[in-house]
Amino acid sequence: MSFLSRHQVFFSLLTTGIFLVICPLHICSQEYKYELGGAAGCSFYMGDANQTRLYLSPGIAGGILFRYNFSFHWAGKVNLLAGTVSGNTEDSGQQFPLEQQATFHRTFAELGTQLEFNFFPYSDKYAYIGTRSYTPYLFAGAGITGATGESDFLRVHMPLGVGFKYKLKNRMNIGIEFSMRKLFRDDFDVTREEPGWSLNHPYGIGSSFLKNQDWYSITMIYLTWEFVMREDPCHGN
């Protein structure tokens, strides 16, 4: 089984690079530069064994995250997460060739980096310039996912998601995120090397960049603690 292809790596790095180029780094920023915390929630898979239903056969997920606050509107995040996903074609509502059926279960781990855009200027200070102690946000980025199984799995993923965060008190944040991870492959739901039919192209139609690709999703609640105060919050130090 092939591993990371060059075009997958290039696309993911290009996506992150575009965000970084347009990110305004040297404007007024939050009082503290960094955040560190933990997250817990649930995960689920979408692919040939589940094409439309959110939270079908949910598993558990959790991990740690680190965030750097560039400004009131922009932040960069690195996370290390792990979780479980499973699927059963009998629950999919799909008809497969010769009425074939399959099940799978994987434990996965991922390392990823994302760029976040806050809709509102996020801070519990500086109300005179319109900051708010809460905000919805969007994020995208790139990462690598590895998963258990007799059939090895190591792939680039691209996360796309939405979240909401709130300052519980000075230096402490709580948030919730929903995200989908695009895997650029169709074999996340194949845990064993078997001859003949499998959930890797089950209809005999090859996948392409946008078609027949597996995804997994993570919904998590997190708590973070801010540290390292800026010398001058209005000069990005």
Image (cartoon, rainbow, N blue to C red):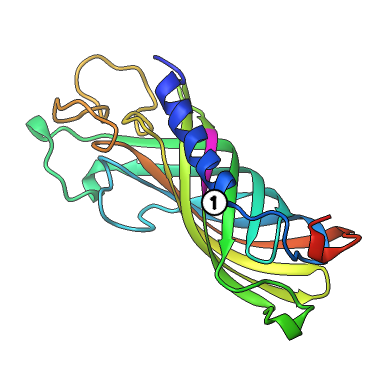
**Residues drawn in magenta:** 140-144
Residue 40 x, y percent position in the rendering:
62, 56
Magenta residue check for 141: yes
Q: Is residue 82 left or right of residue 67?
A: left
Q: Which residue is nearer to you in this view: 215 or 237? A: 237
- Is the stretch drawn in magenta largely helix, strand or loop? strand
Q: Tell me the SS state at disc 1.
A: strand
> Label 1 is placed on what type of residue?
Ile
- Whether residue 5 is visible to the viewer of this picture, yes or no, is no
Label 1, on which residue?
A: 60
Question: Quick check: can you spot residue 79?
Answer: yes
Determine whether, in the image, residue 129 is placed left or right of residue 150.
right
Nearest to the observer: residue 184 or residue 45: 184
Q: Which residue is pictured at 20% across the width and 25% down the height? A: 206
Residue at 91%, 60% in the rendered image: 231
Residue 177 x/y as whole percent? 54, 61
Where does the image place residue 27, in percent across and percent down from the top left? Answer: 72, 62
- Which corner quadrant of the image does residue 90 belong to? top left
**Residue 195 point in image, percent of width and height:** 24, 14
How many labels, in total?
Answer: 1
Which image quadrant for residue 55?
A: bottom left
Residue 61 is a magenta residue: no
Task: Between residue 201 and residue 22, name the one nearer to us.
Answer: 22
